[in-house]
Amino acid sequence: MATNTLSILRPSVNNLAARVFVRAAGLDFEERDVWGKKDEPEFIEKDPAQLTPLLEEEGLPRGSLWESCAIMQYLCNKHGLDELYPRDPGERAMTDSAMFYLTGTLYPLMARATYPTLGFPQYAGEVATAPAADDEMKEQARKDAEAALTQPLDAFHRFFLDGRDFIGGARPSIADIRLAVTLEFLRAIDYEFPQWAEDYVSAVESALGAAYSEPAEDVRGFVGSVKAQTA
């Protein structure tokens, strides 16, 4: 039995972050695709939030843990993976800040801009879920979110990546994994990538090799199939 079990959804970039990480870290793991199974009692018992990726590992107080960044931080701490999660307090703070900024600011905009095209459900309280909102209003909200992506992307470029190849410095950190995989969803809406972002994703994939490219094919294949249907 594998030391780490990941319950995943293959088309998800949130899940892709953890999938790339366990491969890049060389950890013993098993993947379970739980597409269509997150509402089953057995899964809810382990994950009442019904979120993936879900890590199951014997060192956890409750035996399971969700949220991709928390999973990567935990496994780095447990296995001393300083090359992926720097131990220096300042460098670690930069890594943490980049991930928190991504999940708190960049990803919500990304979801609003791409989920309608990808066919993923939007969150409660969004324009896309409002009963009174017509298609024109929903599309305008999506376009507004897409336009708003410019500012957080620029912040990553000008602050976290200023003078560096990666947020982690000379090699990708867990923050780089999280950012690179997130950018994969922008392909769904033909977003005009800044050249630095194109170069950055390519550099992360090149540095991590098959650990990145192999699981990324699931997301890229899904995005490609969506675009083919809407062409």
Image (cartoon, rainbow, N blue to C red):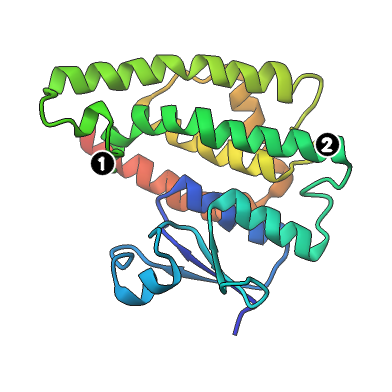
- Between disc 1 and disc 2, the foreground one is 2
Distance from label 1 to label 2 (Cα)? 37 Å
Q: Mark 2: which amino acid?
A: Glu
Q: Nearer the viewer, residue 87 or 207?
A: 87
Secondary element under disc 2, as helix, strand or loop, is: helix
Q: Nearer the viewer, residue 147 or 67?
A: 67
**Residue 77 shows in this picture:** yes
- Which of the labelled discs sits on residue 158, or is there none? none
Does label 1 or label 2 sit earlier along the sequence?
A: 2
Relative to 41, 216 lies left or right: right
Indicate whether 195 appears above or below 180: above
Q: Looking at the rendering, in which quadrant would you find the N terminus?
A: bottom right
Q: Mark 1: which amino acid?
A: Gly
Give the quadrant of residue 199.
Answer: top right
Q: Could you say where residue 83 lies in the image, as x and y percent from the top left?
A: 83, 50
Give the crowd class for mark 2: few <14, some 14-19, many >=20 residues within 10 Å.
Answer: some
Secondary element under disc 1, as helix, strand or loop, is: loop
Give the quadrant of residue 75.
Answer: bottom right
Indicate whether 193 appears above or below 207: above
**Residue 170 shows in this picture:** no
Q: Residue at x 31, y 39 (%)?
A: 123
Q: Which residue is mark 2?
A: 91
Indicate whether 52 appears above or below 143: below
Give the quadrant of residue 133.
Answer: top left
Q: Could you say where residue 158 lies in the image, as x and y percent from the top left?
A: 70, 16
Q: Could you say where residue 212 lies in the image, as x and y percent from the top left?
A: 61, 50
Q: Could you say where residue 191 lies in the image, as x and y percent from the top left?
A: 42, 22
Q: Residue at x 54, y 14 (%)?
A: 151
Q: Residue at x 83, y 60 (%)?
A: 80
Q: Which residue is mark 1?
A: 119
